[in-house]
Amino acid sequence: MLFSSTIGGKDDWARLFQSAEAFCPLIEQIFKTHGLPFSEVENCTPGTNAVFRVGSFVVKIFAPMESGFSSGEDYETERFGLSRANRIGARAPRLYAAGTIEDRYRFDYLVMEAVPGQELGVVMDRLSAEEKRRIGRELRRFVDQMDTPCEPFHAGRLRNAAAAERWTPFSPAFLREREAFLARAPRSAPVYVHGDLTCDNILITPEGELCVIDYADALTAPIEVELACVMCEAFYLEKPFLAGFFGDYDPESLAETCLVGLLLHEFGANIIESRLAAPQDVESVGALRRLLFRRLV
């Protein structure tokens, strides 16, 4: 048995998922299976799943069902997204291996390139206006490559119970207006959407290049969903980034695009609260539109 620890729920997983010692034999076997060079196992930034660095590789081991987390969907989604990005030449970590190892538990895993670099959110304040415009242009190239027609998947997440629950801090009047707005607002045809293009998931390499990571939240959706997240969560609505990404944009038109995307996004309520205003201060869809317009002019 390669994995000897016991996983009987979320508390056990929380205790174990950052333990290089617990996962080392399992990771060594994965690397042996795929003929990859094995070396010391080191911790990476924690998340829901077990993520470790092994030399020039990152290995992500997804939580088994005994952990209380449902990660099978995340595994399939991230594997698909990375494979798609690699196939079309979009800047993403190279996927070296993917599979399932049956041991004491059933573990899905990915082995990918360890991309050197810092998160955009870490370096953002040190960037010049021109560097921000350049990054905006690079991210636009990535979106143009990735956000194209694709077989539908996970589209239901936009309007499921969990997404609806996130809107409950907003007033009943706002929620009724949101529903009426979405019933009539035009939007683009669904395409592949990364779904989580935040400044934490955009790496800037030592050479200044951009690399997008973490594809587990991808889905097919109108591109407005992606653009709203890019504007608010990757670029914090900063004009040099936006100018690089959108060119000479019209603030009124761009505010409408962002409005549609935020009201559709499964985490739109959270984005509004973290980047724009507290729920109690957003009285109507029109007030949200005006708030966006003022940030864009």
Image: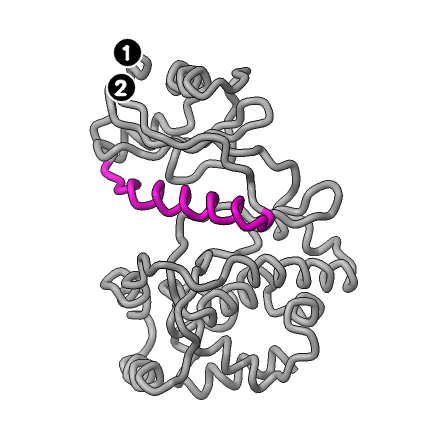
Q: Nearer the viewer, residue 171 or 67?
A: 67
Per the rendering, the mark at residue 134 is none
Residue behind mark 2: 103
Q: Which residue lies furthest to the top in this view?
A: 1
Give the residue drawn at x 27%, y 40%: 69
- Nearer to me, 237 or 187: 187
Say which residue appears at 40% left-offset and 60% top-offset: 150
Q: In this view, does 278 lie above or below 30?
A: below
- What colour scheme does the image use? one colour
Q: Classify mark 2: helix, strand or loop.
A: loop
Where's residue 187, x and y in %?
42, 79
**Rendering coords of residue 295 (x, y %):** 60, 78
In the image, residue 130 lies in the stretch drawn in magenta: no
What is the span of residues highlighted in magenta in the rendered image?
68-91
Tell whether position 72 is magenta. Answer: yes
Q: Which of marks 1 and 2 is nearer the N terminus?
A: 1
Image quarter (top left, top right, bottom left or bottom right) of the N terminus: top left
Query: Residue 197's x, y, as percent?
Result: 51, 57
Residue 173 visible in the shown view: no
Going 52% across and 68% down the picture, which residue do you hit?
Answer: 227
- Which residue is more in the foreground, 277 or 73? 73
Q: What element carries label 1?
A: loop
Few, some or many residues within 10 Å of mark 2 (<14, 14–19, 20+): few
The residue at which mark 1 appears reads as 1
Q: Main secondary structure of the magenta part?
A: helix
Left-right relation of 114 to 108: right
Residue type of the residue flagged with mark 2: Asp
Whether residue 190 is visible: yes
Q: In screen coordinates, is 117 left or right of 24? A: right
Q: Quadrant of residue 27?
A: top left
Q: Looking at the picture, which amino acid does disc 1 mark?
A: Met
Marks 1 & 2, CB-CB < 8 Å contact: yes
